[in-house]
Image: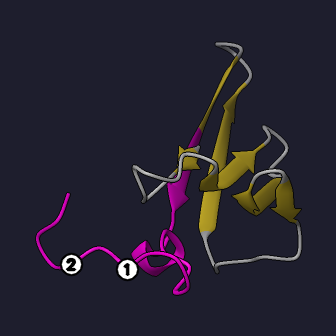
């Protein structure tokens, strides 16, 4: 999942990845720089259905993680 909160800065965004094994990665990017140390406290759950050869993932990410507090504001109440 890629989430950017600033239309004028497409090179600044957050990236969230989940593998079928449950392995996770989250990054704060301001290209070309990548912050691998960043962690926002997000959660995920993976379900593998072997009989259908599929997997699904649910992700729960705090809205405060979208804005880093330096370059953009967190979403206001009612903003979608």
Instruction: Please report the residue visible at 64 percent of the width from the left and 48 percent of the height from the top.
Output: 11
Quadrant of the rendered image containing residue 42: bottom right
Give the Cα separation between the discs numbered 2 and 1.
8 Å
The magenta stretch is 57-80
* Of the pair 26 and 74, the residue shown nearer to us: 74
Which secondary structure dominates the residues rendered in magenta? loop
Image-based side of 13 in relation to 66, left or right: right
Question: Which residue is tagged 2?
Answer: 76
Identified at 52% across, 53% down, the residue is 9
Q: Camera-side residue: 59 or 51?
A: 59
Q: Position of residue 64 (x, y in %)?
A: 45, 80
For label 1, the residue is: 73
Q: Residues within 10 Å of mark 1 (few under 14, many from 20)?
A: few
| Magenta-colored stretch includes residue 76 | yes
Circles 2, 1 touching at the beta carbon (< 8 Å): yes
User: Secondary structure under badge 2?
Assistant: loop
In the rendered image, the vertical position of residue 51 relative to residue 61, given as above or below: above
Render colour scheme: secondary structure
Residue 70 part of the magenta-drawn span: yes
Q: Is residue 12 above or below residue 57?
A: below
On the image, the x and y values in percent for residue 39 come to 74, 77
Please state the horizontal and vertical placement of residue 3, each as a whole percent of the image: 51, 51
Marks 2 and 1: which is nearer the front?
Answer: 1
Residue 16: assigned label: none
Q: Position of residue 27 (x, y in %)?
A: 76, 61
């Amino acid at each position: 999942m890629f989430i950017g909160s600033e239309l004028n800065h497409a090179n600044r965004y957050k990236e969230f990845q989940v593998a079928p094994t449950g392995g996770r990665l989250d990054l704060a990017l301001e290209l070309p720089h990548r912050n691998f140390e960043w962690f926002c406290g997000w959660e995920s759950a993976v379900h593998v259905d072997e009989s259908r050869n599929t997997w699904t993932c649910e992700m729960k990410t705090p809205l405060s993680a979208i804005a880093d507090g330096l370059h953009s504001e967190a979403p206001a109440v009612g903003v979608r």
